[in-house]
Amino acid sequence: MAPTFRLQKVLTMTEKEKEKALGEYEEAVRRFEQAAEALYHLLKEKEKCEAARDEQLRTGLSIGAIRHMLQYISNLQRSIDHYQLIVMQAREQMERRQQRLIELNIEVKKYENMRERVRRWTEQREKEAESRFLDEMAVQRFARQGEL
C-alpha cells in the first residue's frame, strides 16, 4: 500500500506555481533578448553611420548633408539611450523572475524530500511489522512442533 502524503495538495499547488513562474521567466528572457537585439542593431547602425560620416568628411561633403547626417546620428543616439533603458528594465525583470523560480524550486524540493522521508519511514515500519509477524509465526510453529 502506497503511503499517503498529507501535504500532496500543497506540493501539487507549489509545482503548478513553479511551472507558471517558469513560463513567466521564459517570457522575460524572450523580452530581454528582443530588447538586447534591437539595441545591438541600433549600435551597429550608429557605428556604420559614424564610419560613413568620417569617410565623407575626408572626401568632402556639403554642410546640409553634414547636418542631415548629424541629425540622423543624434536620433540614433536617442533611440539607443531609450533601448538601453528598456534592456536594463528587462534584465531586472528577468532576474526577479529567475529569483522567484529558484525560490519555488527550493520549496518544491523541500516537499519532495518530505514525501520521500514519509515513504521511507512507512516502508521501514512495514518491514518491521512483517518481521514481527514472521517471528511470531516461527514461535507458533516451534510451539506446535514441541506439542507433538
Image (cartoon, grey):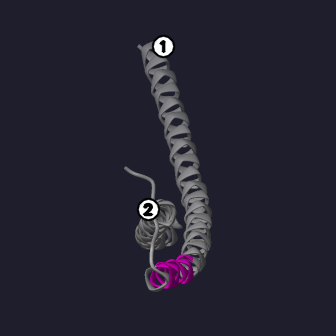
Residue identifier under label 2: 48
- Tell me the kind of residue under disc 1: Gly
Q: Residues within 10 Å of mark 1 (few under 14, many from 20)?
A: few
- Tell me the kind of residue under disc 2: Lys
Residue 80: assigned label: none
Q: Position of residue 127 (x, y in %)?
A: 50, 34
Does the magenta portion include 67?
Answer: yes
- Which residue is painted at 46% across and 81% down in the image? 72
Q: Is any atom of residue 15 visible in this view?
A: no
- Which residue is painted at 55% across and 78% down in the image? 77
Which secondary structure lies at badge 1?
Answer: helix
- Which residue is painted at 44% across and 63% down in the image? 52
Q: Are marks 1 and 2 in contact (CB under 8 Å)?
A: no
Depth check, front residue: 141 or 44? 44
Image quarter of residue 108: bottom right
Does the magenta portion include 4?
Answer: no
Q: Which residues are magenta?
A: 66-80
* C-alpha distance separating marks 1 and 2: 103 Å
Q: Is any atom of residue 106 visible in this view?
A: yes
Residue identifier under label 1: 146
Depth check, front residue: 117 or 144? 117
Q: Position of residue 107 (x, y in %)?
A: 60, 62
